[in-house]
Amino acid sequence: MSRTSARTSALPPTLADVAERAGVSRQTVSNAVNNPDLLRADTLLRVQQAIADLGYLPNRAARNLRTRASHLIGLRIQAVQEGTANATMDRFVHSLVETSREAGYHVLLFTGDPTDPLSGYDDLLRSTAVDAFVVTDTYLGNPQAEWLDSRRAPFVAFGRPWENPESTHAWVDVDGAAGCESAARHLLDKGHERIAWIGWRKDSRIGEDRRAGWHRAMKQAGLSTSGLASRVEDTVASGAEASEVLLDEAAPTAFVCASDTLAMGVLQTLDLRGLRVGDDVAVVGFDDSQVAQVVRPGLSSVRQPLEDVAIEVVTALEGLLGRPRVAQQGVLLTPSLVVRDSSGPDRR
């Protein structure tokens, strides 16, 4: 029995075992794993076959020490907000993990003190446990981007730099204004003129951006928005309360909401009042959550291209981590409207 076959029956195969099986040097095996472009096609194929035959797994820890790279991307995740119907971040995280893996990276999820937006970042940065970060909280006043930028830590933000539009860090975002404008135009095309808006409070730049799309569509149609808008917390209960007030005071025939969570509150109100969703009052949400897809009647909703967001984020990360580093710019993606029964029939 050869030394290689004896080892494989007892211990995990090593780089030396692969070299012996393929009849090449250890450096050639190392090149096949780390720099395959340096090898001839036939040599690379022979080494890869030996790796497959032996089930060899490269020593990532040793490779990280040598290259001073962990191939890990840090992503802080937030606690689930009670009373909501949104799982948008779940879709994004799944897409980010898959896209990162294809690019040779893994995503390290971490948490922090909910009252401290910087909690968790410093420890990872000091320990060089990650090569870069993905930041998802870009609300007004959030210091994460500025803090990471001041420490020259590579990062890409999912969300625009609302605090500092002149910021030069890499970001990817979805055009919420365009999405809500398309939702409002969809309802206008169906003959609605009294289209109400339920969104988030003024300190939410994302919410105000989405509201701007609804407002623009209404103004371009020559319609008043007076008394038709409400700003509340992003919960189902808040959506229900806001829609009750709007129905009593403004008598809208349709609603555009900043989230599916708020739209679910509207659906609750309509049900309690005996109003038919779509036929009596139309409703459009934002995020195309799983709830929007399974509720009956189905909820029309603006869908964010989160798979494309993940691809753009990883592309930007590769540019930041490459040698030489490639300067990145902001990328703004357009969402799409998914039409379901809550839009109702044409009224013209």
Image (tube, rainbow, N blue to C red):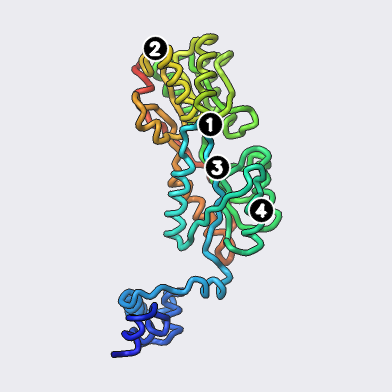
Q: Residue furthest front?
A: 10
- Between 87 and 105, the one lying in front of the other is 87
Name which residue type carries label 2: Gly
Q: Which residue is label 1 attached to? A: 177
Name which residue type carries label 1: Ala
| 7 on left or right of 141 | left
Q: For the residues carrying marks 1 and 3, which lies nearer the camera in this image?
A: 3
Inter-mark Cα distance, 4 to 2: 52 Å
Q: For the residues carrying marks 3 and 2, which lies nearer the camera in this image?
A: 3
Inter-mark Cα distance, 3 to 2: 35 Å
Name which residue type carries label 3: Ala
Inter-mark Cα distance, 3 to 4: 22 Å
Q: How many marks?
A: 4
Inter-mark Cα distance, 2 to 1: 32 Å
Q: Would you say residue 314 is visible in this rendering?
A: yes
Disc on the earlier residue, 2 or 1: 1
Name which residue type carries label 4: Leu
Instruction: Establish if 183 lies above or below 320.
Output: above
Residue name at image x 40 percent, y 79 percent: 39
Inter-mark Cα distance, 1 to 4: 28 Å
Q: Which residue is label 2 attached to? A: 274
Quadrant of residue 319 within the rendered picture:
bottom right
Q: Which residue is label 3 attached to? A: 79
- Is there CB contact under 8 Å for labels 1 and 3? no
Q: Position of residue 226 (x, y in %)?
A: 58, 14
Q: Which mark is residue 148?
A: 4
